[in-house]
Image: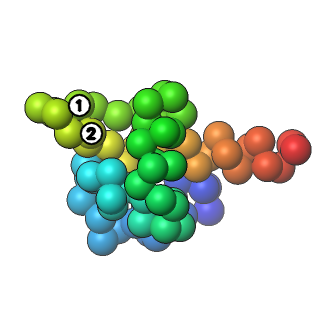
Amino acid sequence: MKAQDAYKMMFRDYPDVVTVDQMCEMLGGISTKTGYRLLKEGAIKSLIVGRQYRIPKLYIFEYLEIMGRETASG
């Protein structure tokens, strides 16, 4: 099973586009401060709708795959 398929199963109860709070939950309960930092630094791609971040799940999967590769090669 590919990593992205595993993530799809893990996060199937989340909508296709999530809020910052939902993203933080998906990333193991990180703080919203850390979540906003990841977004502002561009570590996780996002969209800004009005004045709020919206994050497609696909971008979270990409971030998790990159982090997994960095950890494995670490």
For label 2, the residue is 53
**Side of 68 relative to 1 (left or right):** right
Q: Is residue 35 visible?
A: yes
Report if the CB atoms under discs 1 and 2 are less than 8 Å apart.
yes
In x, y percent, where is residue 3? 60, 56
Q: Does residue 67 sit above or below 39 in this rendering?
A: below
Reading the chain from its start, which is encountered first: label 1 or label 2? 1
Residue drawn at x 27%, y 31% is 47
Residue drawn at x 26%, y 39% is 53
Q: Does residue 50 sit above or below 24 in this rendering?
A: above
Residue drawn at x 86%, y 43% is 73
**Side of 6 relative to 58 (left or right):** right
User: Please, what is the three-letter code of the amino acid marked with disc 1?
Assistant: Ile
Q: Is residue 26 visible?
A: no
Q: Which mark is residue 58?
A: none
Q: Residues within 10 Å of mark 2 (few under 14, many from 20)?
A: some
Outermost residue, left side: 50
Which color mode does the image show? rainbow
Picture quadrant of residue 14: bottom left
Picture quadrant of residue 56: top left
Q: Which mark is residue 48?
A: 1
Element marked by disc 1: strand
Q: Nearer the viewer, residue 52 or 72?
A: 52
In x, y percent, where is residue 48? 23, 31
In x, y percent, where is residue 59? 43, 40
User: Please, what is the three-letter code of the amino acid marked with disc 2?
Assistant: Tyr
Marks 1/2: CA distance? 5 Å
